[in-house]
Amino acid sequence: MKHKLRTQLMAELSRRNTDLITQWVLDESGGIGALVELVLSHEEKVAPRATWVLEKISEKLNEPLADYIDNVINELAKINSSSTRRTLAKVLMLHTIPERHEGRMLDFCISMIESPKEPVAVKANCMTIVFNLLPKYPELKNEIFSIIEDQVPYNSVGFKSRFNVLKRKLK
């Protein structure tokens, strides 16, 4: 299955192909597992395309990663592709982070937010993950706000805008 999935992912980079693969993965037994393997494969062209499919599945279903979230979170920091990190962060925004991984996710997201080399889209998605966890850890609110406010001058208007939207939602 993984070989057929890789072949189809590489056949065409289009929304139509992504939609086709998304439905195929959902219909096939073991499809999500094979897709997650490709997401975490570190293959330069395959992983970002597989992540795009995973994003579409996550938008359709609640918690499709339930059986694979440990692997995704454990491998997240090892992913070199910023586009794959961006999309995986978006996928994780749509899921409940297991309590056992909350500290690791907070550390990862804060390091992404503080990184001068990380694209704003990755930072914005990581910021959302942090804000999703903040109600559980209100004692971190001032520290998180301070970290993000320190980054505002070095990032785009989109970064500041996401911060302001999330602050309003949190209140």
Image (cartoon, rainbow, N blue to C red):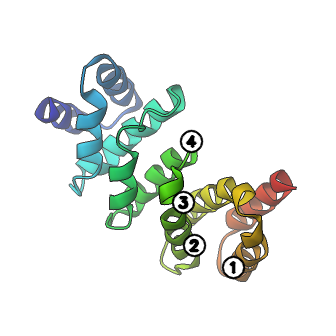
Q: Which residue is drawn at 71% across and 63% down?
A: 137
Q: Is residue 9 above or below residue 160?
A: above
In this figure, which residue is indicated by the disc labeled 4? 94
- Disc 2 vs disc 3: which is toward the camera? 3
Q: How far apart are marks 4 and 1 (CA)?
A: 23 Å
In this figure, which residue is indicated by the disc labeled 1? 147
Q: Where is residue 159 in the image (x, y as percent from the top left)?
A: 68, 65
- Quadrant of the frame with the C terminus: bottom right
Mark 1 in CB contact with mark 2 (< 8 angstroms) = yes
Q: Residue 164 carries which label?
A: none
| Residue 114 occupies quadrant | bottom right
Mark nearer the N terminus (2 vs 4): 4
Q: Residue at x 49, y 45 (%)?
A: 91
- Quadrant of the frame with the N terminus: top left
- Residue farthest to the top, as pictured: 27
Mark nearer the N terminus (2 vs 3): 3
Q: Is residue 120 left or right of residue 46?
A: right
Q: Distance between the residues labelled 2 and 3?
A: 12 Å
Q: In this view, does 29 lie to the left or right of 143?
A: left
Q: Which mark is residue 110?
A: 2
Q: What's the amino acid at mark 3?
A: Glu
Q: Distance between the residues labelled 3 and 4?
A: 14 Å
Q: Residue at x 36, y 20 (%)?
A: 23
Q: Is residue 96 left or right of residue 161?
A: left
Q: Distance between the residues labelled 3 and 1?
A: 18 Å
Mark 3 in CB contact with mark 4 (< 8 angstroms) = no
Mark nearer the N terminus (4 vs 1): 4
Element carrying mark 3: helix
Q: How far apart are marks 1 and 2 (CA)?
A: 8 Å
Q: What's the amino acid at mark 4?
A: Leu
